[in-house]
Amino acid sequence: MILETLRELGQYSLSLLRAAGGMVVFLGTTVFWAFIPPFRLRQIIRRISFIGVKSTLIIILTGAFTGMALGLQLFYTLRRFGAESMLGPAIALSLLRELGPVLSALMVTGRAGSALAAEIGIMRLSEQIDALEAMAINPYRYLMVPSLIAGMIAFPLMTCIFNVVGIYGGYLVGVKMLGLGPGVYWVEMEHLVDLRDITDGLYKSVSFGVIVTWVCSYKGFFTGYGAEGVSKATTEAVVLSSVLILAWDYFLSSLMV
């Protein structure tokens, strides 16, 4: 019984290593072809629109309510210590360094990442990818590279929108609803928030764009057969991307502190 359990555990560990190795090779191949011309600018623009522009509304809504919730909770927390004037910097730093990149990445993953995995998975099942290869069109260059580049461009832009809307959401609650002075809100933020806080969050969002497009493209490219295979690939893509976003965020935060 113990030997059987160890054997199954070993097989499971080897399968995880094979999957991880396959994903790394997939990413390396995509990055390699990203530097080989010709560059498909039209495809990249379409992917930016698909990943970024069409996610703008959900980013604005999520950013607004996140900033408002932060403003409400932080105001009453800071008031216990007589530090209501720190509301602006607290909201700004929370959004710029952590919540903005992470929540915007999770929202885009749920909307665009799942669709990307399903789209490529359906192309695999309908043999469109095989047709590309038969026509001597590299599927990595045609499908994966535009998505990867678009993710690296769109995710920081979505993070910027999220941060701006979130900060103004906190302003509405803290200043307009709870009576904090508008000058205090903005002046303290100007004094305590520096350029590194902004750039650290943007660096995170770029890496999240790579993670989401990489994982979702991989899961769609190697999807199983039938509708169940596409459904499973889409679910695995969203779950794995979300977990990797949170884990990678912690790793980067530990390095940037």
Image (cartoon, rainbow, N blue to C red):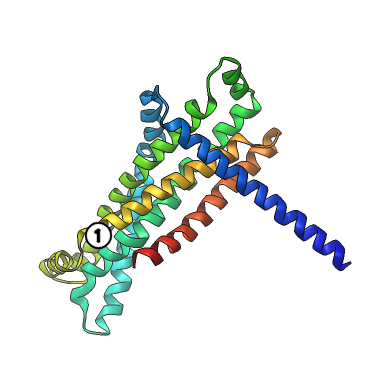
- In the displayed structure, does residue 147 sit left or right of residue 17? left
| Nearer-the-camera pick, 97 or 22 | 22
- The relative height of residue 238 versus residue 42 in the rendered view (above or below) is below
| Residue sitting at x 42%, y 45% | 209
- In the displayed structure, does residue 84 sit left or right of residue 6? left
- The relative height of residue 78 versus residue 67 in the rendered view (above or below) is below
The residue furthest top is 135
| Residue sitting at x 60%, y 22% | 128
| Nearer-the-camera pick, 149 or 176 | 149
Which residue is label 1 attached to?
A: 196
Q: Quadrant of the N terminus?
A: bottom right
| Residue sitting at x 40%, y 40% | 151
User: Which three-letter amino acid code belongs to the residue tagged 1?
Assistant: Arg
Q: Can the viewer see residue 22?
A: yes
| Nearer-the-camera pick, 34 or 208 | 34
Marks counted in the figure total 1
Task: State the image coordinates of residue 180 (x, y, percent, origin top left).
Answer: 17, 72
The residue furthest left is 183
